[in-house]
Image: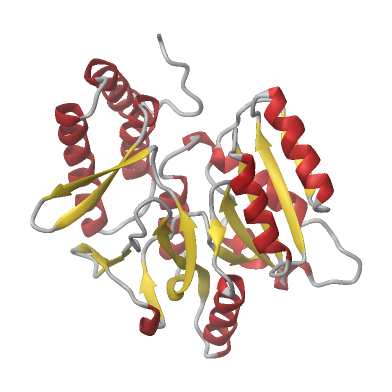
Amino acid sequence: MSAVIVTFNPELTTLRKMIDALQSEVDEIVVVDNASAASAVEQIARLAGERSCHFEALTENLGIGAAQNRGFAVVNRPQGNAVSGERYVLFLDHDSIPEAGMVELLLDTDLRLRASGVRVGAVGPAIVDNRTGTTGRFIVSNGFFVKRVPCSPACGEIGVDFLISSGTLVRVDTFRAIGAMDEVLFIDHVDTEWCLRAKAAGYALFGVCGARLNHSLGDEVVAVWFGRHREIFVHSPLRDYYMCRNTLLILRSVSMSFGWRLFLLMRLAGSIVFFLATQAPRLQRLRCMMGGLRDGVLNRQGKWTPFW
């Protein structure tokens, strides 16, 4: 069992807690840094060395997908007489701290489902926001509708359509069969694209309600009331660009149900309206969103260089 942690200017105290929590749960920890500031790289390298982690420092920010693929390449290397395909890899962001027993429960669930004949693509934990304590919902679809399903530890596992990449456990041969993360998306919807690709290839994804991962989505959380209490995760204007562009890119390139197409379009429209109406800096967000929509239509990919 290997863990791949992608870092980008992480908070060192959190990263240290993360690695310490993982050391008793996995056999190997691979840290891939996506071109953090020089001072941060030195600190990450020192921490990785102290904790006997494999450390890879990228010289430029290649995006989350490329960093995950680089980490997987390390995990996928030959290891003596081990059957590499039967090993597992756990993907994590640098601000994700697993609760005790999370990794073991994910692995046990995967093995049990495989033993019963299920073609497992990946399993993932329930996400607990480390600022609000709210447990996230899993996304499921019946082909025509996509909905978010709440979970409690008593729920066991739930067949889902999507898992955020942080906390996702995948068997090495399964990851090879489904294919690498799409690097041209850079960030945002990299995990969405991979999950939809896995589902289209006939693999099943499962959310494991008893497995918990403390994680923070977005730069801040905004509470709103729209039919029910909701927490909206607010990102930077730069991320608004990738959200708009990559939604259009995956809509045109990934096989998905009508329900998913409708869900992504409604989410895109809702995000544009909400963030422009409520979140400063509005003009900068507008420019980023319009640029993202333009580049999505024109099929422009990869890293974007802002014009300010």
Asked if residue 306 lies left or right of residue 111, the reply is left
Asked if residue 177 lies left or right of residue 220, the reply is right
Asked if residue 154 lies left or right of residue 100, the reply is left
Q: In which quarter of the image is residue 17?
A: bottom right
Q: In which quarter of the image is residue 196?
A: bottom left
Q: Please tell me which residue lies in front, 233 or 81.
A: 233
Which residue sits at x=59%, y=35%?
A: 8
Q: In which quarter of the image is residue 244?
A: top left
| Residue 263 sits above or below residue 160 on the image | above
Q: Provide residue 128's location: percent of width, then percent of height.
A: 41, 60
Which residue sits at x=51%, y=77%?
A: 119
- Residue lying at the far right of the rendered structure: 80
- Residue 6 in view: yes
Asked if residue 59 lies left or right of residue 118, the reply is right
Q: Provide residue 82's location: percent of width, then percent of height.
A: 84, 71
Quadrant for the C terminus in the image: top left
| Numbered disc total | 0
Q: Please tell me which residue lies in front, 133 or 22.
A: 133
Which residue sits at x=21%, y=32%?
A: 275
- Residue lying at the far bottom of the rendered structure: 116
| Residue 58 sits above or below residue 95 on the image | above
Q: Provide residue 243's location: percent of width, then percent of height.
A: 34, 36
**What colour scheme was applied to this rendering of the protein?**
secondary structure
Which residue sits at x=63%, y=55%?
A: 18
Q: Provide residue 197's location: percent of width, then percent of height.
A: 45, 56
- Residue lying at the far left of the rendered structure: 227
- Residue 68 in view: no
Quadrant for the N terminus in the image: bottom right
